[in-house]
Image (cartoon, rainbow, N blue to C red):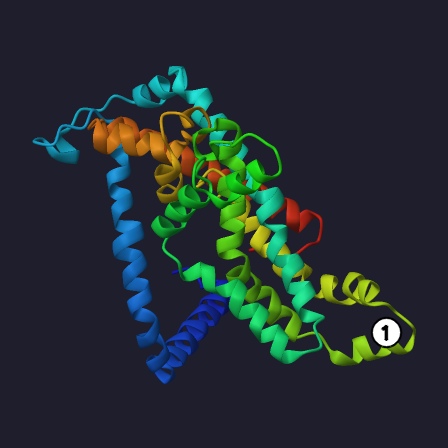
Amino acid sequence: MAAANPLRTKRMEGIRRKRRKARLAIWQNYELYLFLLPTLVYFLVFHYMPMYGVQIAFKRFIAVKGINGSPWVGFEHFERFFESFQFLIVLKNTLAISLYELLVAFPAPIVLALLLNQLTSERFKKLAQTVTYAPHFISVVVVVGMLYLFLSPKIGLVNRLLVSLGFEPVYFMASSAWFSTIFVFSGIWQNIGWSTIIYLAALAGVNPDLHEAAVMDGATKRQRIQHIDFPSILPTIMILLILNIGHLMSVGFEKVYLMQNQLNIDASEVIQTYVYKAGLLEGQLSYSAAIGLFNSVINFTLLLAFNQLARKSKQASLW
């Protein structure tokens, strides 16, 4: 019988030792793992197990036959979507709104956090934070209702102001040209305060001695923001930017659908609303699943690409 390889034996012994240490660590801290268990179960049940049904995107789903009994059709539904006249429309609208949000809405909480961090009056700072946080807790349905009310061509405050200045009233909610702007800026108003929380938390970790030294050297507030505050939150900005790019094709459904009408549908029909109409309203479950899978693959690819780009540029990355 051949002698055992000493190197292999040593490696296996090292693996066993690590496993024993891992089991011991889990046993010693089992309370923490019990706290983690509900979260793991949630993701398993509601995020990973449903992925089994993704296969209907490659089948002609028949409800009475179930997922397993439905016949395979390959990429038929994907080809149908790519050849549809709606493909370019929904893709263009989704990208237009997503890029608009990324360019305008993403930097807004960063700027607000940097400005709030420079306030010397704690009382005014807390007031400003409360005022900007509050809209986040308003229901999307209520926000859209407010938009219809404020932007109404007859009784809306905005149009009343325009008329008083000598302009003609504008039916904002029925205009394709105004849809993206209203969607993005109303989102900024609702979420900017909430989004600043993570940046303010990062700024709280900045060493005060750096600011004291900069003040003694005659640095202005702008220079302190530029050379101390901003570099300190840059890793946080990069992580959130990567995550936002990973959701670039996911504009959202509820708010778009509530703002959508037959007069602005040229600019408001996005992938999420199209999937809802094709899947639930028209019963084309396999077709809508194929569109949703296409959307998810694009998001996942963008996430991987920009994470790799961040790593190559020596910036903070997800992994």
Q: Would residue 175 be found to the left or right of residue 83 on screen?
A: right
Q: Would residue 49 be found to the left or right of residue 103 on screen?
A: left
Number of marks in picture: 1
Q: Residue at x 72, y 70 (%)?
A: 118
Q: Quadrant of the N terminus?
A: bottom left
Name the one closer to the observer, 319 or 237: 237
Residue 78 against residue 28 in the figure, above or below: above
Name the one closer to the observer, 316 or 194: 194
Name the one closer to the observer, 63 or 211: 211
Name the one closer to the observer, 225 or 53: 225
Does residue 22 appear in the picture of this structure?
Answer: yes
| Residue under pointer 1 | 214
Q: Position of residue 173 (x, y in %)?
A: 44, 34
Q: Residue at x 54, y 63 (%)?
A: 132
Q: Residue at x 57, y 63 (%)?
A: 196
Q: Would residue 14 be found to the left or right of residue 20 on screen?
A: right
Q: Amino acid at mark 1?
A: Ala
Q: Would residue 273 be found to the left or right of residue 234 on screen?
A: left
Q: Quadrant of the C terminus?
A: bottom right
Residue 122 against residue 165 in the figure, above or below: below
Q: Position of residue 253 (x, y in %)?
A: 37, 41
Q: Residue at x 55, y 30 (%)?
A: 168
Does residue 58 appear in the picture of this structure?
Answer: no
| Mark 1: secondary structure | helix
Q: Position of residue 312 (x, y in %)?
A: 68, 47
